Amino acid sequence: MTNSACECLLQLYEDQLELEDYQSGVPRWCSGCGDNAILAAVQRLCRDQRLRPEKTVFVSGIGCSSRFPHYMKTFGFHGVHGRALPVAEGIRMARPDLHVFVNTGDGDCCSIGAAHWIHAIRYNMNMTVMLHDNRIYGLTKMQVSPTSPKGTKSNTTPRGSQLEALRPLTVTLGVENVSFVAQAVDWVPELLYDILHKAFHHRGCSFVRIVQRCPEWLPNAFDPWMQDPMRLLLLTHENGLEPGATVSRVYGNQEVHDPGNIHRAREIASIDDPIPVGILYRNPSVPCYEDLCQSGELNTAEFIRAGLEAEFDKFTVWPQVD
Amino acid sequence: MNDTSLRKKAPRSKGAAPGRKAAATLTQHVVEVISDSGEGAQRCGQALGAIAARMGNGVWTVEIIPAEIRPPARSVAGASGNRIRLGASSVSNGGDETDLVVAFNEQVLLGRIRAGELKPDCTILLECTWRDSADPKVAASYREAYDRLVAAGYKVYEIPMEQQCRALVADSRRGKNMFVLGMLCSIYSLDLVLAREQIEQTFSKKAASVIETNISLLNAGHEWAEANLDFKYHIPAARATVPQIVVNGNTALALGVLASGMEICSMYPITPATSASHYLSECFHRVGGIVHQAEDEIAACAFAIGASYAGKCAVTITSGPGYSLKQEAIGLAVMAEIPMVVVDVQRGGPSTGQPTKVEQGDLLTTIFGSHGDAPKVVMATSTIEDCFYAMITARKIAETFNMVVVVLSDASLATSQTPFARPGFDTAWVAPPVDQSPMPPGTRSYDWDATTGLARRLIPGQPDGMHAVTGLAHDRLSRVAYDPDINQEGLRARSLKLAALQKTLKTPPVFGDPHGDLLIIGWGSTRGAIEEAVECLRGEGMKVASMHLQFLQPMAAGIKEIMARFNKVMTIETNWSDSLEDEIIDETNRRYAALATLLRARYLVDVDCWTEVRGQPIKPGTICRVIREKWHH
């Protein structure tokens, strides 16, 4: 595989990178859209982690949030609806030297791409997955999403949606090989940043659901939660989030939750109100699929020749010798 | 297998037994070995093919596969085995109906007769243990079938295979196949020493006692045939002078993937493509490659796109229904100009269709499929050897032009074997290392060349190469295009790349006279049968020639000029076309075969077609008959 070759090419840069080094274009999201907050947190994370822009790839599908890669001055891949995860997996498999991030919406991940979501958790490839969950289809102009609360009025459910909302965290925590699950809200930037920071440093598939506002199609939907800090349940632990004094003072509704406890994590995942914020689950010992697949061989022409000749030998009919 | 000590010790065949006719010399013969699943007819047939290949005979073997995994024993639909065509010179296809068949029971034989696969005077060697079966129903069914076969004019020999084997092995049902191999070696005057070597190779991973038992079965079969059969054949052979590879088309495709320098294959199981991935899974790591079985066809394609985007070209291998699922993602690869090789081992369709049967039904889908204008390269393999080299060519084109290259094979090539010269490794096959060189600031990610539409591909890791690839219409900086001129420009660039490739293609050669009355054009696995038919018809004095297209999109220059040198042009294909003989079909509503449709549209030539969709490869004799009928009309 290419990893050894790429490792040889790794350079240790000393230059200071600024926020502008990660910014590209002016986001065309609506004012007040949660995507803006996520973009700001991610750009800050890249700067603080000094990620080389050329070594960083943001992969997305289709939807409002999937415009994300266009606003990062890194490599980006804005693909087709629902398929961000398998594209990101291919990148990761080919290039373990790259930092891979995925930005996907609730329609992209939990509806059209749901099969890939389940399997991405199971593959546990090293990448940070951000589920931008605004509970509505935005780009196609307000249709119900799998995460829309029951009764949501939309263009396809004018009398209110009939089905209970799917809970992305309980689904994710039900999949074998799950290794990192967290939840953030777009309106508390400090916690959003801290959670993404933890996700980035986890080796494996870090799944972060970000509850976000859609000012256009579901205006004021989260106002009651924004106005009452007690309606967030802040998860703290020495192995999870350790919020600063200011945040702790504002968000007093807290639970000390060990991210190693998957049973409690699953209970927390099914709480809708208050909204849990923090690291629900983390297990650094789950192997990554790419590590299990990599041969670690340097793929030279001579190596290929030797492998190929050995295979030819299996099928060769030699001329008769007298 | 190069154990010469064994060769010295082993006695050579003594030739025909007293009372037996001298061996009749043949130029070619088609033989089938058929049994229930699990009785080893496949292994016997493959060994026969390999021995004949070593003798220097032309060989073409085809697997006979039942549709079910475990069909009931002694069932008409359950025939499993091999069809082997032996020739004095090289053989390019499975040939016409079968001349000689060895059947382990009468039911599987009836299946082959119903399928129209046996010659009317076919020689049948039939296991006769059923005649005295303890089950009266089985015995009655056997006797009735035997009588009917004899009455129908087949030359039936009843052979006590099981009884003969019982002295040598405990489970005579399982040893029968090597006994039959010995019989066939006697019938076709094949060298027993080579047969023994073949058995040693076939069972090389088994204990020495297993090899010994199988060699004793082989000898017993040979002796029995020498003593009891009144006929014998000899197919002259030109001794092979170079090492040859004997694999089926799917294994050849996989070997081609190894040789091409591609490192990632992502796939989802589908018949008849999967055996290529099975073999690749076994050996890809030996050249540093990875096979990823994705959660579905779409993911397999998206995974390949991601891997290609991040470095070298990746491949995804599928069959028709899987190709349909991949089409949206293929459109993305076209738009984003990501190199990718997609292999479509075609089968019968639409829908689940005939998964194990032969059809060339995906040509138009692969050329015009996806959505919007999605130009991609489509090439077809026409021989087993071609399956190997096509993968190397496909990877090179994909990376040179940053395009999707679709390689079409089909169930016929996938399950057939014929020897081809062992390729000599060439370092030029292998892909260059992933480009990680820094780009000058201001580099544009889609800097389309005004003439060829080509743009340099920027790969993650290249300093100052950063950009966001997008499936949206985009400008030269990969920014989302809101300007109508930019969309026009992007579509032009992606289309021009096909023309640029076309300028590098050679005009396909004409098989036969350069001008004449009829030109047959084909593509894919029909090549051998078409060329054999052309040769035969030319022998009858007809002015017929053929041309086989490797590139279907783009088509090489010079084709129109070749067509102009013939009075009539027609395609022969294994896909659907309406027949003018049908009451409501006329020139205004006739649906032409896929290649005929393409040729008519491109060259404004009245190209006719003849097609057959019987799930089997088209036979050379059938083509001869069709052309003769057209000729005399």
Image (cartoon, grey):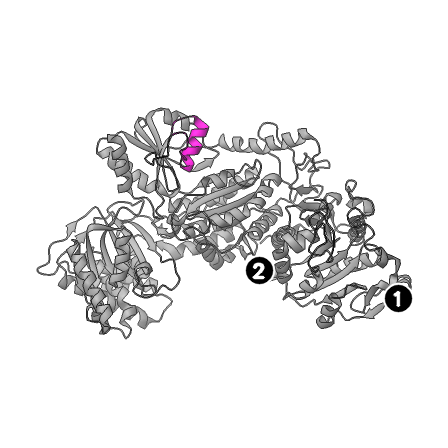
Q: Would you name the residue on which mark 1 appears?
A: A252
Which quadrant would the N terminus of chain A be assigned to in this image? Answer: bottom right
Residue depicted at x 28% and y 46%:
B95
Q: Is residue B396 left or right of residue B222?
A: right
Disc 2 crowd rating (10 Å Cα; few below 14, some 14-19, many 20+) is some
Q: Is residue B314 visible?
A: no
Kindly identify the residue that appears in the image at 55 percent across and 56 percent down: B292
Helix, strand or loop status at disc 1 = loop
Residue marked by disc 2: A293
Mark 2 chain: A
Is A56 left or right of B351, judged from the image as shown? right
Is B441 magenta? The answer is: no
Whole-percent x, y for residue B119 in the image: 22, 50
Question: Element under label 2?
Answer: helix
Q: Which residues are magenta?
A: B587-606
- Percent from the top left, x then y, of residue B357? 38, 51
Label 1 sits on what residue type? Gly
Most extreme residue toward the left, as rendered? B19
